[in-house]
Amino acid sequence: MRISYLVSVLCVGLAVFAAVPAQTPQLTPEQAVGGKLDAPVRIEVFSDFQCPACRGFFLDSIQKVLENYCSQDKVCVIYHEFPLKNHNLARLAARYSKAAQRLGRKQWLTVMGALYTNQAEWTWDGSVDAVISRTLSPQDFAELKKRLEDPSIDTAIDQEVALGEKRQVTSTPTFFLISGGKEERVVGGVPYVVLKGYIDRLIG
Amino acid sequence: MFRRILHWLCRLILAGIFLYTGYIKLRSPLQFAAVLAGYQLFPDALILPMADYFPWIEIALGVLLLVGWKIRYVAVAACALLASFLAVLSITYFRGIEANCGCFSFEDRISLLTLGRDTLILLPALFLALTGARAVKSEPAPAKTT
């Protein structure tokens, strides 16, 4: 009797203690790469364009989440720039991404896709500008170049890095999955099949 | 007396390890699922169910080791669990896959060090499985003095 009581108290205690309440940072719809902010599941990714694991996570998992869940507003995906100091071109790529974000969601996604798809190319020769120029329309590219001169781009990146540090992000990709007021921190990428199974369970 | 202390020490150490590792996995089921997927060993369909049930097995073992119920059987189960975990980690390591260990944290890469550490954890479980409750019960009761 005493043993079963102890076991049940421990199990309930652990389950209650294991649930981590979500820390909701100030988010704007412009930060969402897909879906609406009030979607039942929100994924906040801290990512570095020069990191191979971030590339894999974006191209293999996040793009499919955008296609299959964000388009139906079941999931909201937010991307935060987190250029690591040991990646010499990550900050430059993050500046292009941030400038593209200000042009609109479509342009932002195009630039993100181009940066991750051609990661090997621009990390080899530093040709970030050339990679972006061939993926955007001439008008969008000219507008993006203009936005790159805005000093608030750097401020915005610094704020996202500070947010990541505040949330104990030390490596990339690190993402937070928020649903039902609970938040789960995940370090590293997750294969789409696993992420899909988990999201399906959360949204019923 | 020494054997009795060692027996209790092994139980407490193992129970502490199982409760802690079970708790961190329970706290981050998706992270644990990602670690399991990272081993590239299990079918995709099994990853989420494994991530759900495995932490509860560890917690159950930790609680049973603490309360001392059927200690020998529990220790054998702990040995089996630790040995299978060690086998999975070794296979992943020797296949050259860079994956997280998922033992005490989720930022711990599999290395010879983590394999050595997990082998060490197996020792107290083996001791308990081999000696069981005998270590506590077999000692003669102290003579009564009047």
Image: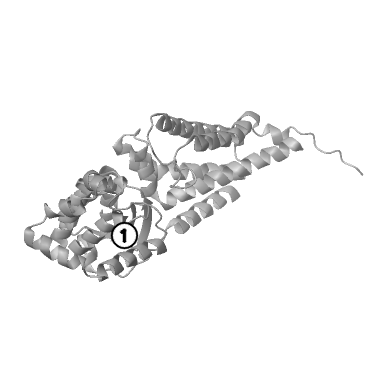
Q: Mark 1 points at which residue?
A: A179
Taking the spot 15% from the left edge, 63% from the top edge, the residue there is A144
Name the outermost residue toward the front: A125
Q: Which residue sits furthest right?
A: B146
Instruction: Please determine whether, in this image, residue B17 is positioned above or below residue A94.
Output: above
Please tell me which residue lies in front, A37 or A130: A130
Q: Which amino acid lies under the numbered mark 1 shown in the image of this protein?
A: Ser
Q: Quadrant of residue A70?
A: bottom left
Q: Residue A149: x, y in percent?
A: 21, 68
**Residue B127 sits in quarter:** top right
The image position of residue B143, as x and y in percent, is 86, 38
Q: Nearer the viewer, residue B59 or A136?
A: A136
Lateral position of residue B62 relative to residue A54, left or right: right
Residue A164 in view of the camera: yes
Residue A41 visible here: no
**Residue A95 at what x, y percent from top left?**
25, 61
**Left or right of residue B72, residue A69 in this image:** left
Q: Residue at x 32, y 53 (%)?
A: A88
Rendered residue at 20%/46% (across/down): A118
Q: What is the basis of the colouring in this image?
A: one colour
- Check the residue under mark 1 and report the chain it is in: A
Number of numbered discs visible in the structure rendering: 1
Q: In this view, does B57 lie above or below A185?
A: above
- State the image coordinates of residue A33 (x, y, percent, origin top left): 21, 59
Mark 1, Cα crowd under 10 Å, few <14 / some 14-19 / many 20+, is: some
Q: Which residue is drawn at 30% across and 37% down?
A: B44
Report helix, strand or loop for mark 1. Answer: strand
